[in-house]
Amino acid sequence: MRKTYHISLSSPDEVLFRSEADLVRGFNSLALATLETDSRLLADGFPSTHFHGLLQTDAPEEVLYRARYSYARSFNPKYKRRGRLAEKYGFILEVEGYHHTLAALNYVNRQGLHHGISSTPFGYRYCSANAYFSRQLGKRSPISLLPDDQRYKYIPRGVHIPVSFRMDASGMLLREDILDVAQVEAIYVTPRNFLYQMNRIGDETSLRDQQAEKSSSPLITLDLLEKGMPDFDLTQLLKNENGKHDPNRISDLELCQLIDERCLPKYFRGATIYETTVSQRSFLFDLISRNLWKTLKKKTTEAQLKRCLCLK
């Protein structure tokens, strides 16, 4: 019998997803891992340094292994990188009980909000928040689908997926086909409650509801699910959860794009960040630190710049 698990995988000293194409591959890798293990994916969230998933499975370790291995086979050749990608085992937590599951769903779906990428959970494409109650909330719009003969570009070689699983024009498998949307909507019950939960800050009521359950799971909190992730700062995460999004803060994806598409071609003949030396990366660190605000009116931090430059 499948149990419900929260899983996550992080990359402590580097960015796991340097571009939107990487995020597409990342989601496809997790989606294929759930299909290959006969699991059911309920929710997902993909910030730049890690990913979260809530799923029902008999083999959470196998899902994490397959997702990491599949994604590394794309990431390492693309960036001329060697070695294991991300942490070896990841984080696995069994989630038992209605209120525990609801809290986990809320936290996973609000990844864009928690990490200051967007001012609402719905403003970030690379999480599952927009997959539920899409008709009732007016979120359905025409989708440009990828022709069947182009699908092979976005999945590992030798992997076959049913034709019924569609891909959008970016090559990402549609969440509507992968996620168990019906089950999640049944947990939220109504579109109105779903909107309430997406705007609900983790509070004492949520903790009391969990405490009242006869569950062996620990209390599901932002601290529990995010602690240990790169650049973890609970105070900042809680500020972000209140919707205090700073539009002047550069995202990891924007910063990696600046490094990979402008700095590296200009100064190091198009080498990938993994083909540069520590001294070359330090040069880029000083260069960007001095000029980012002057040129783009964007702010960064030392920790963010170091992880995007793979500087420990």
Image (cartoon, rainbow, N blue to C red):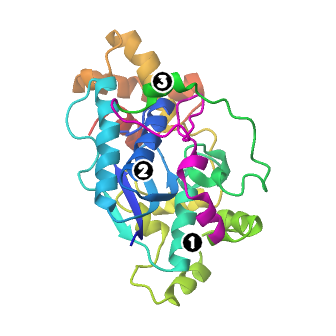
Q: Secondary structure at mark 3?
A: helix
Instruction: Confirm whether the magenta stretch covers residue 125.
Output: no
Q: Name which residue lies at 34% across and 65% down.
A: 58
x and y percent of residue 164 in the render?
56, 41
Please tell me whether the stretch drawn in magenta is mainly helix, strand or loop.
Answer: loop
> Which amino acid type corresponds to the residue marked 1 in the rendered image?
Leu
Instruction: Confirm whether the magenta stretch covers residue 167.
Output: yes
User: What residue is shown with label 2?
Assistant: 35
Q: Is residue 145 above or below residue 94?
A: above
Q: CA distance from mark 3 to mark 1?
A: 38 Å
> Which amino acid type corresponds to the residue marked 3 in the rendered image?
Leu
Which stretch is magenta?
Answer: 157-186
> Which amino acid type corresponds to the residue marked 2 in the rendered image?
Leu
Q: Secondary structure at mark 2?
A: helix
Counting the numbered discs, the total is 3
Q: Name which residue lies at 24% across and 24% down.
A: 279
Q: Residues within 10 Å of mark 3 (few under 14, many from 20)?
A: some
Q: In the rendering, which numbered label is found on residue 102?
A: 1
From the viewer's perspective, is 80 left or right of 144? left
